[in-house]
């Protein structure tokens, strides 16, 4: 079974620029997550989708971050404008979304804001 | 708010030494518990999970974990580590009312010296 695909793997941008990340979850997985992992910390949930609806975006800095999951399949996460403190690895994960299950993670996108 | 604590931030062991990594959570209700591992340059992978039943669960590569409900703990163990176990280990918790909401600890970096 194909895993969670993310692109790009690495991105370096200057502060105040914008950036977008893409995620394609495992086929058939209804739940999609975006996590932010700052160096030395565990993954922090930014947003959780169930199909194409948002379940939880309480930790998403909505003044600069946005995410969408059109058609309930792949998803994009955007940052505009970026700040230095946004430097992190952005992880996408997916799960079946029904009953007791595990989350499957992509390789992540390492963002460096200079 | 729910939280997951991993008190060992960095552990260094020699090969064949025994390993125990601590994980405590603050959620008072029923939870599902996970240990994920991230090998250098790779994505997060599931090591083992506890949903119900026998509180001693066995995972891949000789790892096991014990759920002690009274202590809100889910410690990871391995009797004899190998150099290939060098990785970062994350404990995660999902509350029973929302199987799909994962809370992660800050991670423990394990270095195994050959």
Image: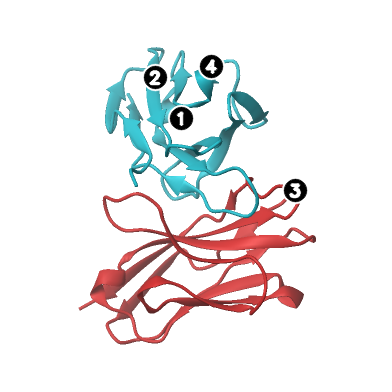
Chain colours: A cyan, B red
Which residue is rendered at x = 31% and y = 70% of the image?
B85
**Relative to the observer, which residue lies in front, B14 or A2?**
A2
Q: Chain of mark 4?
A: A
Instruction: Classify mark 3: residues with Cα within 10 Å, few (<14), some (14-19) or many (20+).
Output: few
Report the Cα–Cα distance between label 4 and label 3.
25 Å
Q: Is there any visible trace of residue B72 in the rendered image?
A: yes
Which residue is rendered at x = 47% and y = 41% of the image?
A93
Instruction: Classify mark 4: residues with Cα within 10 Å, few (<14), some (14-19) or many (20+).
Output: few
Q: Is there any visible trace of residue A69 in the rendered image?
A: no
Report the Cα–Cα distance between label 4 and label 1.
12 Å
Which residue is rendered at x = 40% and y = 29% of the image?
A23
- N-term mark: 4 or 1: 4
Name the residue that disc number 4 marks.
Answer: A64
Position of the C terminus of chain A, as image quadrant, is top left
Which residue is rendered at x = 46% and y = 13% of the image?
A80
Percent x, y of residue A35: 50, 38
Percent x, y of residue A26: 42, 39
Give SS at disc 3: loop
Q: From the viewer's perspective, is residue A42 above or below residue A65?
A: below
Name the residue that disc number 1 marks.
Answer: A85
Write down the quadrant of residue A44 in the picture: top right
**Relative to the observer, which residue lies in front, B96 or B6?**
B96
Name the residue that disc number 2 marks.
Answer: A20
Q: Looking at the rendered structure, which numbered label has been put on residue B1? A: 3
Query: Which is in the foreground here, disc 4 or disc 1?
Result: 4
């Amino acid at each position: 079974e194909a895993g969670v695909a993310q692109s790009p793997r690495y991105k370096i941008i200057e502060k105040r620029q914008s950036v977008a990340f893409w995620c394609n979850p495992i086929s058939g997985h209804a739940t999609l997550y975006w996590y932010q992992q700052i160096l030395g910390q565990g993954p922090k949930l930014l947003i959780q989708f169930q199909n194409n609806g948002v379940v939880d975006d309480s930790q998403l800095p909505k003044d600069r971050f946005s995410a969408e999951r059109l058609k309930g399949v792949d998803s994009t996460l955007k940052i505009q404008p970026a700040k230095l403190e946004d430097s992190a690895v952005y992880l996408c994960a997916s799960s079946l979304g029904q009953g007791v299950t595990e989350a499957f993670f992509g390789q992540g996108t390492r963002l460096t804001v200079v | 708010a729910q939280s997951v604590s991993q008190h060992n931030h960095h552990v260094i062991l020699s090969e064949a030494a025994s390993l125990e990594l601590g994980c405590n959570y603050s959620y008072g209700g029923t939870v599902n518990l996970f240990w994920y591992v991230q090998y250098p340059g790779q994505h997060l992978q599931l090591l083992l999970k506890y949903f119900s039943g026998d509180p001693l669960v066995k995972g891949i590569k000789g790892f096991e974990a014990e759920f002690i409900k009274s202590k809100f703990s889910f410690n990871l163990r391995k009797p004899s580590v190998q150099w290939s176990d060098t990785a970062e280990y994350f404990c995660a918790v999902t509350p029973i009312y929302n199987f799909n909401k994962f809370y992660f600890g800050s991670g423990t970096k394990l270095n195994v010296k050959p």
